[in-house]
Image: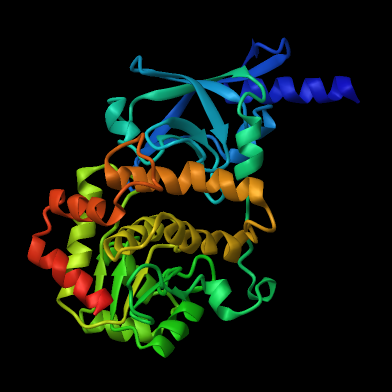
Amino acid sequence: MQVLYLVALLLAMLLTGLLSACGKDGKDAPEVRDLGVIHEPEFGGVYIKMTIEDFNALGFLYGDSVTVSFSNGYKLEGLPYYNGYYTQNGSPLLIAYPGYDYIKAAINNGDDLWTVAGLSEEDTASITLNEHGVFADIQAARDIHYTDAREDYPDDQTFANFRSVKAGDILPDVLYRSASPCDNQHKRATYVDALLKAAGVRYIVDLADTQEKIEGYLSAEDFACDAFLSLYQEDLVIPLALNMNFASADFARKIVKGLTGMTEHEGPYLVHCTEGKDRTGFVCMLLEALCGASYEEIVSDYMITYNNYYKISKTEDLTRYSVIVENVLDPMIRSMIGDENADLTKTDLQQAAKVFLTKAGMPETAITALAGRLCG
């Protein structure tokens, strides 16, 4: 049986251009060569044309250390290979995110790797294994999944990740956050739509989509989000199409555009992306800080999302809870502050939020108006 397995593996290697290599652990290690590349502009990265299933079948494991070499000479050595965006902001990785057609090399919440590497569609990529399991501890802590089945959640609010933001001086039932009320890829849009209608939402800041994407959702046969449609037709939805580069000027500029829209319209307001997690998390963190929320309040609100989706809380899974706060939320807050070494429990977060918005081009009068909309 072992001989047959080795023969089959050898045939697969010949068919895909795979060569045998040797990892630092002394075991035979795979190498893929001369795979095509595709630019992924929404979050900034490089699709490498091999499916996740085929890549893993060659022997690559989540938590491995790999090297990605491009035909133009650009090389990334010692990358972690994860099935999620588990590196710190600005750090590169090779990722097999569930639902992606191909594996992808990217700089997490950083500059577009396609541009950084100077790639074109004529270039190719090769990947070699350095060592198995170098990043296995982080992979284990961050490897979390949720289902898209309503029956797996206790109520509609939890399933839709829909809630009123209550941190700082924000008035009750003025600011809401959620998963998408229009993109139904996770089967939540109609639930969010019903909840935003019940909450009386009058203005939506859509962090995930372009107008073209929204038009695509509206034309889908199964689209059934009438409350969202009504607001969209009244020009009360502002699509921002944010990427995940929290430190970029474009990210900040688009946020100011959305928040300025809030100052010009009556609430209640809804902020959402696709899952209502990271881009929504950043914008809500910024608004909470502007409205006087403490670090602890910001952490508490952000982590409700992880409890909703993954049942991760201080009491149920403190280790993962702490890893997520330290590796996901804290870098967002430090990006807002502009200081990677800031003590988040001692920083004046309200002043930091004002400075962030000012640097992004929001006038002081608009910042004051925004706080007034949220806090009364």
Question: Can you say whether 335 is above or below 37 in the image?
Answer: below
Point out the image quarter for the N terminus.
top right
Between 194 and 304, the one lying in front of the other is 304
The total number of labels drawn is 0
* In this rendering, position of residue 20 left or right of residue 371: right
Question: Can you say whether 34 is above or below 367 in the image?
Answer: above
User: Which residue lies most toward the right here?
Assistant: 1
- Please indicate, yes or no, whether residue 62 appears anywhere in the rendered image: no
Point out the image quarter for the C terminus.
bottom left
Instruction: Residue at 38%, 61% (x, y): give it.
Output: 280
Question: Can you say whether 285 is above or below 119 in the image?
Answer: below
Where is residue 198 shown, x and y percent of the image?
Answer: 43, 89
* In this rendering, position of residue 255 left or right of residue 152: left
Where is residue 249 shown, x and y percent of the image?
Answer: 20, 44
- Please indicate, yes or no, whether residue 135 appears anywhere in the rendered image: yes
Question: Can you say whether 2 is above or below 362 in the image?
Answer: above
User: Which residue lies most toward the front here?
Assistant: 346
Where is residue 301 shown, x and y percent of the image?
Answer: 47, 64
* In this rendering, position of residue 102 left or right of residue 8: left
| Colour scheme employed for the rendering of this structure | rainbow
Q: Quadrant of residue 105?
A: top left
Where is residue 291 shown, x and y percent of the image?
Answer: 29, 66
Instruction: Residue at 55%, 22% (x, y): give it.
Output: 66
Instruction: Residue at 37%, 86% (x, y): give it.
Output: 227
Between 186 and 160, the one lying in front of the other is 160
Between 338 and 105, the one lying in front of the other is 338
